Amino acid sequence: KMFKNYAASEFSAPALRREFDMAQAYLQGRKKTVLGIFRISGYEEGIEIMERISDRAGIDEPNGIGLHAALAVAEHYEAQEKYLEAYLKWAEIASYWETGPIGKRALYRMAEDNLAAYDRHAEERRPCFDASKLTSARTYYQKYLALYPEDAKANDVPVKIQHIDEEMALKQLFIGQFYRRT
């Protein structure tokens, strides 16, 4: 109610900071009580609060609380191995920050999350799944390599691109073997 009626109040910044602290506690595993009996994890509540903070404050300030909230959500999704959701959050951040340290980090994390989304399946089953994430990861890695060659070499991006090429070749071989059998 305070944010809606008194958005320009001197207390809005501390209240936003307090909401951020509460959401961060939920993302770190704090439990919440439901019906006065059950204690369940508050991950969803934490994500919801962080999303509200980033929507309210915006993610266009480099040291703003909105950007920190968006980064916390993306990192939480990665920690929970929800790579597609993490990729979408990093893509949202990258839409505001195309360059600079935040843009560089977002570009690299988008590539990593796309590759992890494909690599999470068992190795012998990977060729059966959609390779669009591999293609996206390869594109982001190549862009990262072109924009930040020193950091790319330090993060083994050329090796990761080669790994993606091998996965794509294996997928094509798998498809060829299927048609040969059929």
Image: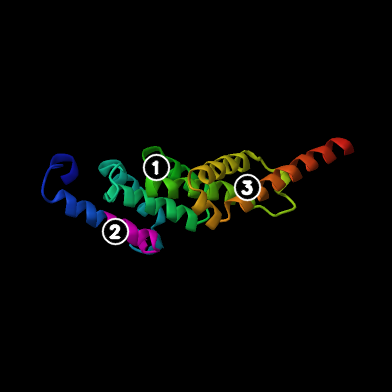
Q: Residues within 10 Å of mark 2 (few under 14, many from 20)?
A: some
Where residue 57 sits: x, y (%)? Answer: 26, 44
Residue 95 lies in magenta, yes or no? no
Residue 99's disc is 1
Q: Quick one: which residue is furthest to the front in this view? A: 150
User: Three-letter amino acid code at disc 1?
Assistant: Thr
Q: Residue 16 vs residue 178: left or right?
A: left
Q: Secondary structure at mark 3?
A: helix
Mark yes or no: residue 156 visible: yes
Provide the secondary structure element on which disc 1 rests: loop
Which residue is at 16% across, 49% downward?
Answer: 12
Give the residue furthest to the right: 181
Image location (x, y in percent) of residue 67: 32, 48
CA separation in Å, label 2 and label 1: 31 Å
Tell which of 141 and 124 is nearer to you.
141
Query: Could you tell me if residue 1 is visible in this image?
Result: no
| Residue at x-position 73% and y-position 50% | 125
Q: Which residue is mark 2?
A: 22
**Does 154 appear above or below 176?**
below
Task: Specify whether 115 is left or right of 76.
Answer: right
Residue pictured at 58% horizontal, 55% vertical: 156
Q: CA distance from mark 3 to mark 2?
A: 40 Å
Q: Quarter of the image holding residue 5?
A: top left
